[in-house]
Amino acid sequence: MSKITHIKVLGLALFAVFAFSMVAAASAFAQDEWLFKGEAFVGELETNTEGELTLIALRAGVVLNEIVCSGLFTGDVIGGGPVNLVLDLFSLTGTEIAELGGTSLDCLTTFSALSLVDCEVGLETLLWIEELRLEPASPLTWESLLELMMTEPFFLVKFHHVAFELLCFNSLGINAEILCEGVTSAKAENVAGGVLLEFDPNPAGTILSEEIACPMAPEMGIGVDFLGDVLSVDSTGGILSVS
């Protein structure tokens, strides 16, 4: 084989590898999107995400409290890509939840380690949502992105900023106020009714939800994990899915 022919063959081989890589990358990118009735769509779809989550307050890996909250998040998924916006939170009776000073979500403390900052078991713990909307017309903060995990065959929804405030009574009968904010994730799974989001901080398998830091708390080093499932559906009754 001549030197020129060898260069041509090598060039064709490199072009083929490059072309295959571009196709593979494009295919992987195209998979990370929300679908409506099994098809790609243009624009925004209103969604309802409802369920029960356990907020696990801990310090240095030791569980202080388990607080159960039920609610309904409303928002939009954006066609042609991975973006999901959470816009508002409601109680299951339809009351809109506000920031601190407004209407709170009533949660229930189900476990206490009886330390100084613990909430009392059996009593309500109040939750306010923070920074859902930077401005009334600019819902930019609680954005999540859908990602196909390359090491495992499932989708992950990554919430890029979550912020909330908790208020409860501790073992001394004094108000304990905790502000928490950070990032967390949930496994996204297509089910009959829509997309199931599974939160699990200590998975036996591969689900992982990151701990939310609580920089404003009675003691340093407190964080909150999420555990539980919520179902995300199209508000008009159409089938929502991920691909």
Image (cartoon, grey):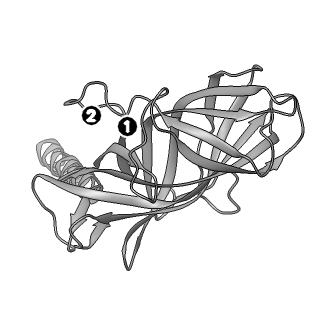
Pointer 1: residues within 10 angstroms few (<14), some, or many (20+)? Answer: many
Give the number of callouts. 2
In which quadrant will I find the C terminus? bottom left
Question: Which residue was labeled with disc 1?
Answer: 142
Can residue 172 be spotted in the picture?
Answer: yes
Name the residue at 12% across, 61% down.
41
Would residue 236 be found to the left or right of residue 231 on screen?
left
Would residue 239 be found to the left or right of residue 201 on screen?
left
Looking at the rendered structure, the secondary structure element under dot 2 is loop
Of all residues, the one furthest to the bottom in this rendering is: 192
Q: Are marks 2 and 1 in contact (CB under 8 Å)?
A: yes
Q: Position of residue 96 (x, y in %)?
A: 38, 45
Closer to the camera in the image, 104 or 118: 104
Q: Does 25 appear above or below 232? A: above
Looking at the rendered structure, the secondary structure element under dot 1 is loop
Question: Which residue was labeled with disc 2?
Answer: 139
Name the residue at 61% across, 59% down.
206
Name the residue at 46% across, 59% down.
92
Q: Amino acid at mark 2?
A: Pro
Mark number, residue 157: none
